[in-house]
Amino acid sequence: MTNTPVANTPSDSGRSILILGASRGIGQACALALARAGFSVGVACRRANDAKAVALEIEAIGGKALPITADVCVASDVQGAVAALVNAFGSLAGVVNNAGIVEPIGHLADTDPAAWGRLVQINIVGAYHGMRYALEAMPKGGVIVNLSSGAAASAMEGWSAYCASKAALAMMTRVAQLEYGQRGALIYGFRPGVVDTGMQVSIRASGINPVSQIKREALAPADQPAAGIAWLFTAKPADLAGLELDIWDAALRARMGLAAL
């Protein structure tokens, strides 16, 4: 990533975004992209050292960041993260629900029930917590971006938990927009494509389904979806609210200012 400085304009003051799951990969890239767009960023990670490290990266480019230790599975942690961000920066422009895992990977009857349930807690309940407390705190025009996946609509061998969780998240996005759209909320599901993250390491190691066969050099860098997510917070396209947005869609890429594939 480049060290492009943060844009400091008067309209940027008082805008803050909470990123849940910001320690690495897309979450980390989003934190930097949003800071460059002029937002103050709440960097929420399960480990305090991870949150501090990303916050220092943001501060190094002239941005404002608040490191927050939070487990998305714990409602009070997420509620506290939202409150901390509002106390620090005065307002909440929105939330990125990025926390998520893909394991257990394996045929359904071979998976560990505890691991299956843990994925559901992180991927669905964690996102619910982010939405629930953001909707309570955001002013009119607030934005929520839920990290979705093509797995929300396509069955993938070995991903029973992950596919089910992303399908559930897509429906939660639709329901929340139905309930809160008339109050000014803008809620998007965003499918980032196949990105070079730690999750892909686990997928390749599994050897299950075609995604595991994609070579690392063919994966997209995390700053591509991060740029798309930053666009959603700045452009706030009302016509896309409540939808599943796929970064591979040519028309969407054009609107976002991303290079054609």
Image (cartoon, rainbow, N blue to C red):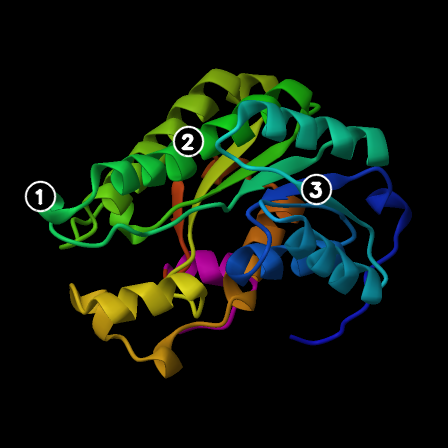
Q: Residue drawn 26% across and 50% down?
A: 104
Q: Amino acid at mark 2?
A: Thr
Are discs 2 and 1 less than 8 Å apart at CB?
A: no
Callout 2: 10 Å neighbours few (<14), some, many (20+)?
Answer: many
Place of residue 44 in the rendered image (x, y in percent of width and height, measured from the top left): 64, 44
Of the image marks 1 and 3, the number of the one nearer the N terminus: 3
Residue 33 is inside the magenta segment? no
Q: Position of residue 126 (x, y in %)?
A: 47, 33
Query: Image point 75% across, 40% down: which residue?
Result: 16
Front disc: 2 or 1: 1
Q: Is residue 11 left or right of residue 166?
A: right
Q: Position of residue 196 (x, y in %)?
A: 43, 70
* In front of the other: 56 or 216: 56
The quadrant in which residue 140 appears is top right
The residue lying furthest to the left in this view is: 109
Viewer-nearest of discs 3 and 2 = 3
Residue 142 disc label: none
Q: Is residue 145 visible?
A: yes
Measure the alpha-carbon separation of dots 2 and 1. Answer: 29 Å
199 w.r.t. 159: above or below = below
- The three-letter code of the residue at mark 1 reads Ala
Question: Label 3 belongs to which residue?
Answer: 68
The tag on residue 109 is 1
The label on residue 173 is: 2
- Residues at discs 3 and 2 in contact (Cβ within 8 Å): no
Q: CA distance from mark 1 to mark 3?
A: 37 Å
Question: Circle 3: is it few (<14), some (14-19), or many (20+) Cα within 10 Å?
Answer: many
Q: Is residue 79 left or right of residue 64?
A: left
Quadrant of image for the C terminus: bottom left
Q: Which segment did they paint magenta?
A: 249-261
**Please, what is the three-letter code of the amino acid marked with disc 3?**
Ile
